[in-house]
């Protein structure tokens, strides 16, 4: 009898010691379930944005020196004046994708495409003063000097006032600041027969293709967002300053000799400095998953 009582007492003590252990394990399981459920409720917020941009370029730049030098050396077939336009403004389209990296910050990447800048006129021209090899009047001639720019950029924004919630809903106007950088490419299409400066031979060489260049760009901006309550769309406007200078526009001939455009007779190459302030305006839409 005593042995039975002793066995029951030991069993009871063992159960009393084991129950808290089981209870703790059950609590851990509940906590793990709640954490998993909470994690599943946390949304990632992203957005798509499309913008147009209008930029003011510095009028005191190499390209305008170039056009100012070559224009007086050209004439129409009847001896009239010819003027190749300088570049003073730029227009850009931008398409980007971004994601909220924290409740008050976001990062985005995008593609940019600038409309062509410069001149393109078709007519009859006398280019003898510009190039001694052009002894005949060029009829129905495409007198062009056009610049094309495109690139890939990334930026980071910090919301100062208001921000979208965890579901990507913006209730009130938001203000943010940010900066970015990117890699840009330029193509300069000059009229047929333009004589550039061959850096290898130090002589004039006819450029038979487009001058090309690649350069980094850096920017800083302040932006405002405003919900328009239509399909979840957001209006976004920005004031931005972009530093972008294509300092090495070049063309290579069949001998891999580098030829450049010059803005004076000493052989100084033309830099395409497209830096300046820009105004951007577009539509944006947040989404979550």
Image (cartoon, rainbow, N blue to C red):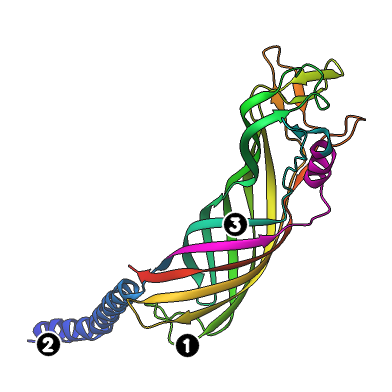
**Residue with the most extreme front position:** 78
Q: Residues within 10 Å of mark 3 (few under 14, many from 20)?
A: some
Residue 246 screen position, x and y as percent: 73, 42
Q: Secondary structure at mark 1?
A: loop
Which residue in the protein does label 2 denote?
Answer: 5
Which residue in the protein does label 3 denote?
Answer: 91
Frontmost residue, 1 versus 142: 142
Which residue in the protein does label 1 denote?
Answer: 172
Where on the picture, by quarter, is residue 187? top right
Q: Secondary structure at mark 3?
A: strand
Frontmost residue, 19 versus 126: 126
Residue numbers of the magenta segment: 48-71
N-terminal label among 2 and 3: 2
N-terminal label among 3 and 1: 3
Is residue 51 inside the magenta stretch? yes
**Alpha carbon separation for disc pair 2 and 1:** 74 Å
């Amino acid at each position: 009898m005593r042995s039975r009582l002793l066995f029951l007492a030991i069993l009871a003590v063992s159960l009393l010691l084991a129950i808290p252990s089981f209870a703790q394990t059950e609590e851990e399981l509940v906590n793990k379930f709640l954490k998993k459920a909470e994690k599943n409720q946390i949304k990632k917020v992203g957005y798509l944005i499309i913008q147009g941009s209008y930029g003011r370029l510095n009028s005191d730049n190499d390209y305008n020196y170039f056009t100012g030098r070559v224009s007086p050396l050209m004439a129409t077939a009847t001896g009239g004046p010819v003027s190749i336009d300088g570049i003073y403004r730029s227009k850009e389209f931008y398409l980007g994708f971004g994601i909220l990296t924290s409740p008050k910050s976001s990062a985005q990447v995008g593609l940019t495409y600038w409309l062509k800048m410069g001149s393109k006129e078709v007519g009859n021209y006398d280019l003898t003063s510009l190039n001694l090899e052009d002894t005949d009047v060029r009829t129905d001639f495409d007198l062009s000097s056009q610049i094309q720019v495109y690139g890939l950029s990334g930026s980071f924004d910090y919301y100062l006032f208001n921000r979208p919630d965890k579901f990507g809903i913006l209730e009130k106007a938001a203000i943010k600041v940010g900066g970015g950088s990117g890699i840009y490419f330029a193509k300069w299409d000059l009229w047929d027969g333009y004589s550039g400066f061959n850096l290898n031979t130090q002589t004039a060489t006819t450029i038979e293709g487009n001058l090309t260049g690649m350069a980094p760009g850096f920017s800083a901006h302040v932006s405002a967002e405003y919900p328009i309550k239509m399909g979840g769309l957001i209006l976004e406007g920005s004031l931005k300053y972009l530093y972008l200078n294509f300092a090495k526009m070049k063309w290579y001939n069949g001998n891999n000799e580098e030829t450049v455009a010059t803005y004076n007779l000493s052989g100084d190459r033309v830099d395409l400095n497209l830096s300046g302030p820009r105004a951007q305006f577009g539509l944006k839409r947040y989404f979550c998953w």
